[in-house]
Image (spheres, rainbow, N blue to C red):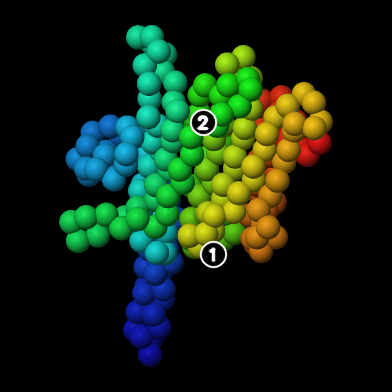
Amino acid sequence: MKKYFLFLLFSYSLLSFSQKTESYKLTKSEIKERELDQVSDFPIYKAFECSDKAGVYNLLLCENQKNITKKDTLNTKIQAIYTMSDHGGFLEKWRINDLLEITEPKETNIWFWTKYCSTKDLDGDGYIDPVIVYGTRNENNEIRRVKIITVYKNKKYAIRAVECVLDYCRSFKKDANWNSLPPKIKTYVDNLTAKLRKEQDLILHDG
């Protein structure tokens, strides 16, 4: 009986360890070795390996970098792709696409705000809940749009904001399904929004 108990305890410990969520940034050589560039339409700006109860995945942040000068690039399109290796190929779980909008003043750059992106288990259920943040700038070098997209159980929940000094052209909208997110995730994103307001001097509210 004692041996059986120890076996169960050992098995439980292994199961608990195997369900730990982790993520780390992939190097350029790791991206090339895994042939992840075959998945995306654009160059991979940054890539992360994420592991949780469901398996091991790769988060790819891709930008179609256009050279302006030798040192500077601007992007007109972006992609975020969540994928896993599958029988010699790749199984895509979800994808985010966006591009510059026709506005006045004109949008000139769209980019991933990686310092605010997250690959963590936000509600403690053993699954990673990616949060993707990106923005656009106009030709006056002003931030125009900010998007915060949370992916929970492979479904997207977005906050879409347009910055403007005038009330009528400013907006801050949460998707209709936002309130179905777990409270811990909503709290995390609300705190992230407050952080963006403070650190980037953004308004991020409607009207």
Which residue ends up furthest to the bottom in the rendered image? 1
Relative height, residue 151 to residue 166 (above, below): below
Residue 30 percent coordinates (x, y): 25, 38
Q: Read off the residue under disc 1.
A: 125
- Amino acid identity at mark 2: Leu
Relative height, residue 206 to residue 143 (above, below): below
Q: Which residue is at a point 81% across and 31% down the rendered structure image?
A: 167
Q: Which residue is at a point 35% across and 48% down the rendered structure image?
A: 58
Task: Give the quadrant of residue 161.
Answer: top right
Q: Which residue is at a point 38% across and 42% down the rendered structure image?
A: 60
Residue 57 percent coordinates (x, y): 36, 53
Check residue 100 in the rendering and tell me which mark sits there, or answer none: 2
Residue 159 percent coordinates (x, y): 64, 45
Horizontal side of residue 15 vs 122, given as left or right: left
Residue 74 percent coordinates (x, y): 44, 21
- Amino acid identity at mark 1: Asp
Q: Nearer the viewer, residue 77 or 73?
A: 77
Query: Of the residues under marks 1 and 2, which one precedes in the sequence?
Result: 2
| Crowd band around label 2 with a 10 angstrom C-alpha radius: few (<14), some (14–19), many (20+) | some
Locate the N terminus by quadrant.
Answer: bottom left
